[in-house]
Amino acid sequence: MNCPVCKTVSLATTELETDLIVFACQQCGGDWIRDSLYKSWREKHAEDLPEKPGNGSAIQFTSVDLARLCPDCNRILVKYKVGRDLDFTVDRCGGCGGVWLDKDEWTVLKDRNLHDNLYDFFTEAWQSEVRREETRKHLESIYEQKFGTETYAEVKRFKAWMDQQPLKSEIVAFLNDSNPLGV
């Protein structure tokens, strides 16, 4: 079984966590996690795993957009964005359900307590939330660039205040009126 990144390097069996056997590439540092082995590990350690995701540090990874093939069944691996301020994808095989993690991705996922929720990344709900967060960040960037950092901070403060006002519509009408006092 060869590495989906390095292509010609054989994957070696190793223990990623206690009782979690994976197939690691000694050249690129990636790990192939078989579906059945991950599920067994989750079941065996369900009581030991924290319930809520942590807030570990963000690490930037470089992404290579080349198609990768499953080392077990040779199907194309599908990339899923992780989100949560993590700028990398996790590759999954639609055939056998195996997961490919590039070097250090497991460590980052574990630091954020997302390592025990790998399958959440592959759900429509998770991917929709990732897209919403990306859109929000993109719009924030556009507004900050358009208004400037200081002005945008003030506009956000004012908007938060406006959202609390029971006469919000009237205030907006007053602000939009070029001559509200008829002078």
Image: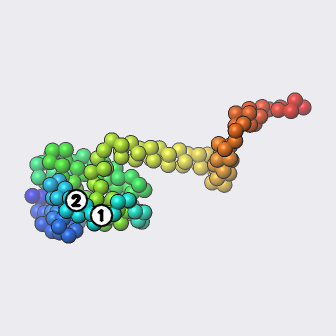
72 and 145: which one is in front?
Answer: 72
Q: Amino acid at mark 1?
A: Leu
Q: Residue 14: horizontal and vertical position, in percent?
A: 15, 68
171 and 48: which one is in front?
Answer: 48
Q: Are marks 1 and 2 in contact (CB under 8 Å)?
A: yes
Residue 42 shows in this picture? yes
Residue at 77% x, 34% y is 174
Residue at 28% x, 66% y is 48
Quadrant of the frame with the C terminus: top right
- Identify the residue under disc 2: 42
The image quadrant of residue 20 is bottom left
Q: Amino acid at mark 2?
A: Arg
Q: Is residue 117 left or right of residue 74?
A: right
Q: Please, which residue is most extreme toward the right here?
A: 183
Q: Residue 123: horizontal and vertical position, in percent?
A: 30, 44
103 and 129: which one is in front?
Answer: 129
- Identify the residue under disc 1: 49
Q: Is residue 96 left or right of residue 171?
A: left
Judge the density around disc 1: few (<14), some (14-19), many (≥20) Cα neighbours within 10 Å: few
Give the structural element (helix, strand or loop) at label 1. loop
Residue at 27% x, 51% y is 119
The image quadrant of residue 88 is bottom left
Give the structural element (helix, strand or loop) at label 2. helix
Q: Residue 129: horizontal and vertical position, in percent?
A: 41, 45
